[in-house]
Amino acid sequence: MQIRIPAHRPYFGAEESRAIQAVLDSRWLGRGRITKEFEDRICEYLGVKHAIAVNSGTAALHMAVGALDVSPDDEVIVPSLTFVSSVQAILAAGARPVFCEVRKQDLNIDVADVAGRITPRTRAIMPVHFGGRVCDMEGLYRLTAGRGIRIVEDAAHAFGSSYGDRWAGALGDLGCFSFDPIKNITCGGGGAVVTDDDELSERVRVRHNVGLNTDSWSRLTGERPWYYTISEHGYRYYLGNLNAAIGLEQMKRLEDFRIRKLAIARRYDDAVAQTEGLAVIPHCLEGVFPFNYVTRVLGGRRDGLMAWLKERGIGSTIQFIPNHLQPAFSASRCSLPVTEELYREIVTLPLYYEMTDGDVEEVVREVRAFLASRSAGGEQAAAPAPVGQSAGD
């Protein structure tokens, strides 16, 4: 069955095509003037001093945790209900992940649970702004005050979301974004690290380009453009002009994207509240740029609903499989009953800019049709596999 209404879909127009063609015509495809313009635009939008554009959200998280110069004895507390990139970045930087619970009301980090997991080895906390809803940052500030614990925001879902008068990603010591194909804006593939800390910024900037103190574009007008120095180890993580050109055009559409996705999320909220067998995940949409729409399916019927939708050409997915249940992270396995209960119930319904009102009505109609049918009964597997496209990077 062809999926007519996917769970996620990026939007591109003629402007992105022209921007890509202009970069191709320039013959400078790597990091250059367009990348710098994109970084400057992010700084301007978020009100931060530094933005370093990288080739994925995973790279952003790796660079951010690595900038803290963690050691194998250091711990980083992270929700288990997040994409695997959050955890892999902690491990790649050389630290140990400590998994924590999320709250049922918004799927965000449970600050009270975090408090019980802090040890003398805790170096950082990584709040994940799930679905674009910003975590309880005030609670985290109070918890970490005077303890030397850094906050690295995983804001992969939350570019364009705000917290009071500040933007997601600009609230901690470092903030990390993803601009992969299905995020709030896309570069085709990409990410960014933002910070107001000069020292942390410099560590990220050097390391994201294989340890080079200056990039090729910056050296171009020098007397010896071929000359470079390596000050420390690094990675090939920079964002090139091609991807940055897409990002610059997407930034112009940011408010249009937000308004449309908010309208769809509100329609879903109304429908879920009136549908027996579903549970609304309560959330205030003020200041939120919704990345996805997640609801809970009660009575062990989630997998059946996903199969029903797929048969009718409607995509869905599960975001995410809890990381503490993954075999690769067995060394950090623990009991997280709230997270495990949510995993058995949550489903992500379609949400994207080009989704029409008719598409939304069709999704709602088919969800209700399944829940009203005999097919809605039965138990589901304890560890179901996701259906549809996952949110990566």
Image (cartoon, helix red, strand yellow):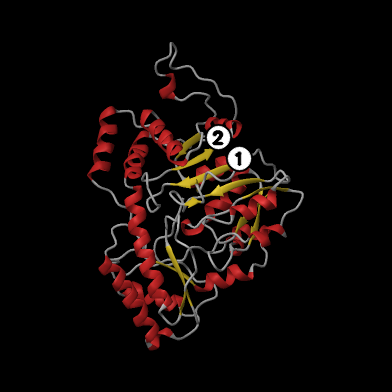
> Looking at numbered disc 2 in the image, what kind of residue is underneath it?
Val
Q: CA distance from mark 1 to mark 2?
A: 8 Å
The 10 Å Cα crowd at callout 2, few under 14, some 14 to 19, many 20 or more, is many
* Left or right for 338, reference 309: right
The residue at the point 48 percent across, 36 percent down is 51
Q: In front here: 328 or 296?
A: 296
Horizontal and vertical percent position of residue 295: 46, 70
Horizontal and vertical percent position of residue 241: 36, 34
The 10 Å Cα crowd at callout 1, few under 14, some 14 to 19, many 20 or more, is many
Q: Give the residue at mark 1.
A: 66
* Left or right for 364, reference 236: left
SS of the residue at dot 1?
Answer: helix
The residue at the point 56 percent across, 63 percent down is 322
The residue at the point 64 percent across, 53 percent down is 140
Residue 310 visible in this rendered orientation of the protein: yes
SS of the residue at dot 2?
Answer: helix
Q: Give the residue at mark 2.
A: 204
Q: Quadrant of residue 217?
A: top left
> Looking at numbered disc 1 in the image, what kind of residue is underneath it?
Gly
Q: Are marks 1 and 2 in contact (CB under 8 Å)?
A: yes
Q: Residue furthest bottom?
A: 374
Horizontal and vertical percent position of residue 114: 67, 58
Q: Earlier in the sequence, mark 1 or mark 2?
A: 1
The residue at the point 58 percent across, 56 percent down is 136
